[in-house]
Amino acid sequence: MPMELSSGERQELLALFEPLRVADISDGMDWLMLHDVGLVDRSIRPLSRSMSFVGFAKTTRYVPTNRKIPTMTPEEYGTYVGRWYNEICPYPIGDVIEPGDVICVDASDLDVGLLGSENVLRFFNKGARGIVTNGGCRDTDEVIAQKCSVFSRHVSRTMVQGRLEFSDLMKPINLGGVLIRPGDIVAGDGDGVIVVPLERAREVARYAAAELTRDKVNRRRLYEEGGLPLDETVR
């Protein structure tokens, strides 16, 4: 399992990775012979192309439920739904979020709206930088308007009752064919999501930064040759 980091070490690592693109991080992994390690399946996409994040993984898992919902009145159903969220499908991840975290949710690849505008914003208010799930997010127009970076396999419509139940928290998970352990570095942008084993993070960041620098130098020259105004991607 990844080692424990002090607050200062967390900030140091975040500062190394914040300027990097997912493509740079992938290149840094290649330089260390970690080809195809950490590349999350491309079907897990940002709700908006402008979304990006980098941070430390906090993991949680949800599984399909076999519990059947009994017939009841709408009034009874309101109480039943509250009990489902509190007892069967709670969100204990909210209790462990620290500033700089990325919430990684294994939702068993199901098209269920486990995430939505309210709980996503609550998690971001606690310091989350991004959310990645192989499940679904609903209320996506609001999530985008809130500028919360969510990457999901499904854009969903449903609630969780009769569909999902909580399994475990802060254990290694499989997300998009990739092992994610609590504490690993997770980054996402328009190119997708990548996971860096924490014990290799500093090495990866060093080679990824070198690749980014080379790219900026070469592209700046092409900007100048083409008479393009310089922007932040080449400075």
Image: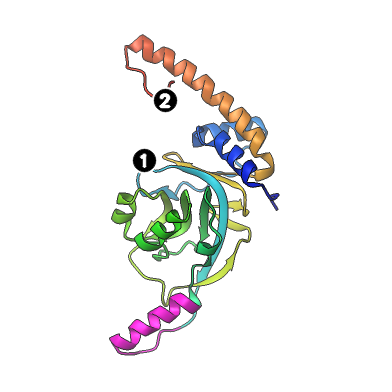
Amino acid under label 2?
Thr
Q: Secondary structure at mark 1?
A: loop
Magenta stretch in the rendered image? 68-87
Q: Earlier in the sequence, mark 1 or mark 2?
A: 1
Count every numbered label the image shows and give the total.
2
Which quadrant holds residue 15?
top right
Up the image or down, 116 lies above or below 55; here it is below
What residue sits 64% from the left and 39% below the top?
Answer: 201
Q: Is residue 177 magenta?
A: no
What residue sits 46% from the left and 50% below the top?
Answer: 130
What residue sits 56% from the left and 40% below the top?
Answer: 14
Q: Secondary structure at mark 2?
A: loop
Which quadrant holds residue 98?
bottom right
- Residue 177, given in percent of the width and then of the height, sits at 56, 52
Up the image or down, 13 lies above or below 45; here it is above
Q: Nearer the viewer, residue 85 or 15?
A: 15
Q: Which mark is residue 233?
A: 2
Q: Which mark is residue 196?
A: none
Amino acid under label 1?
Ser
- Residue sitting at the far front: 8
Q: Which residue is mark 1?
A: 50
